[in-house]
Amino acid sequence: MQTQAGRRAGGRAVGTVLAAILLPAGPVARLPAQSLSPRDSALHALNRLAYGPQPGDVDRVAAMGALKWIDQQLDPDHLDDRVLAERERAFTLLGLSRDDLARTYLDAERARRERQRNAGADSTMRQGPDAADQTPEELRARRLAGQLQELAVVRAALSARQLDEVMVDFWTNHFNVFFGKGADRFLLPDYIEHVIRPHALGKFEDLLVATARSPAMMFYLDNWQSVTPGSRPPQFARAAARRPELANRMPQGINENYARELMELHTLGVDGGYTQADVIAVARILTGWSIARPQQGGAFEYHDWAHDDGMKVVLSDTFPAGHGRDEGMRLLHLLAHEHATMHHVSQQLCARFVADDPPDGCVDDAVAAWQRTDGDIREVLRVIFHGPDFWAPQNVANKVKTPLEFVVSAVRATGADPDTTPRLAQVVARLGQPLYQHVAPDGYAERQDDWVNSGALLARMNAAVGLAAGRLPGVAVALDTLIPATGDAQALLDTIDRRLLGGAMSAHTRSVIEQQLADVADPVARRNLAIGLALGGPEFQRQ
């Protein structure tokens, strides 16, 4: 346990070391050409294909060979994931169907409205998310929302199938759905479990079709309400005769939201050569792709009455009149096999795994693999990971971790154990990346410039110091075996550098940490502070 003096020293250090370590820090010193040792290669692979190494991982992967470990990650079904499977048992969310979740959230909404009605004009009634007067139904829905976010953190931290988890995050971001929009509060868990996860390393076209048919995506981008103007369901006339006001509640026409994002974000890219006329034609093709009543779980449905069966032209391809749901499938096949789609998605994959501005050669190799394998994501990744750009020394430690990557990598590096409360996911949110809460369909940014500023770096430093001191909520850490406390500051920093930073600690960072340790007499407090400052420093921020 940290002493009061140690806490005071840690607090002073965070404030005084920030300017010294973080703000002037330029790029981490690059390794000279042809200098990647087996340990360098292992650390690089673990930082890119995984959420960083756990204790002992670098030596294990170096002994095995980084390429062999990569091939194992590309075939995750053969990896033993019993540790994660046991932890997942605590997440009741995983045992609930989409219908179960719909009932839970609708019950919570009814309870909330009833509570507010009962409050009447009482201006002292607390309405915040932490209000003690929330009903049991509201609290249950809130706990399940927290479980959804925490589950992502726990899986990233504990899974042996690290690349699979990284790709789940990649595709969840690529095909972003905002958790806070209406029915998506109960549709999103099914989207993650049954749309994204099973297809993370499969064929791109299969993933594209799965997202297009997903109730979560249909609701988020409003395609469930897109109908041919003037169309009405067969039972509408009888219902409208009894209740004329229903006419104002019916969808009135085509909605272009999903059609636009399908081409701009999911497939072709903003420079993919499509026009506004293409957007309208795609929206017409996808009329009738809808969902059942959200209150009943919102399963995918095709409504023939809502479909525009006229002729359409997309990217110069003609879709003859008289077709129904099948032309939507033809459209998705067309988009999945467009060269612009191959280039756009390959560029994003190279940006995720190689460099924010990926080399042309990496993208070209990925596109060639896509063409050769009919969009097999696993084989596209294999080409990237075996290619020269992935291993080029200038691309080592050249990317800044997102808040999720930072928190999970710090947990893994210290051998810490995340619990099943939402507290660790809340730390990620405080650092700027609330999971599943990006409102716009473009997902969270990948580039360094979007994550690096003085406020964000200070928050990361505080989180790192809190983790090392055992004060970070949602995680238990025991450092005695990993890095024993010692009165020898030089030996301590040598151990931290070797076990947490892979030998990358700069002389400047080392000097600043030494200065901060000078006033800390207690060996445990000194050890904890040194670890926290190292985790919050520039070398650990990069991957």
Image (spheres, grey):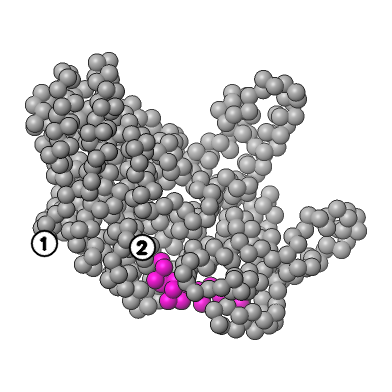
Residue drawn at the location 36% of the way across and 38% of the way down? 456
Q: Which residue is mark 1?
A: 34
The answer to whether residue 379 is seen in the rendering is no
- For the stretch drawn in magenta, what is the main secondary structure? helix
The answer to whether residue 136 is seen in the rendering is yes
The disc labelled 1 sits on which kind of residue? Gln
Question: What span is colored magenta in the figure?
Answer: 327-345
Q: Residues within 10 Å of mark 2 (few under 14, many from 20)?
A: many
> Taking 346 as reference, is 415 above or below it?
above
Depth check: give the residue in front, 409 or 432.
Answer: 432
- Residue 374: image x %, image y %? 40, 76
Residue drawn at the location 56% of the way across and 83% of the way down? 317
In the rendered structure, find residue 349 and report the number of the disc placed on it: 2
Depth check: give the residue in front, 184 or 79.
Answer: 184
Depth check: give the residue in front, 343 or 111.
Answer: 343
| Measured Cα–Cα span from mark 2 to mark 1 | 24 Å
- Image-based side of 150 in relation to 506, left or right: right
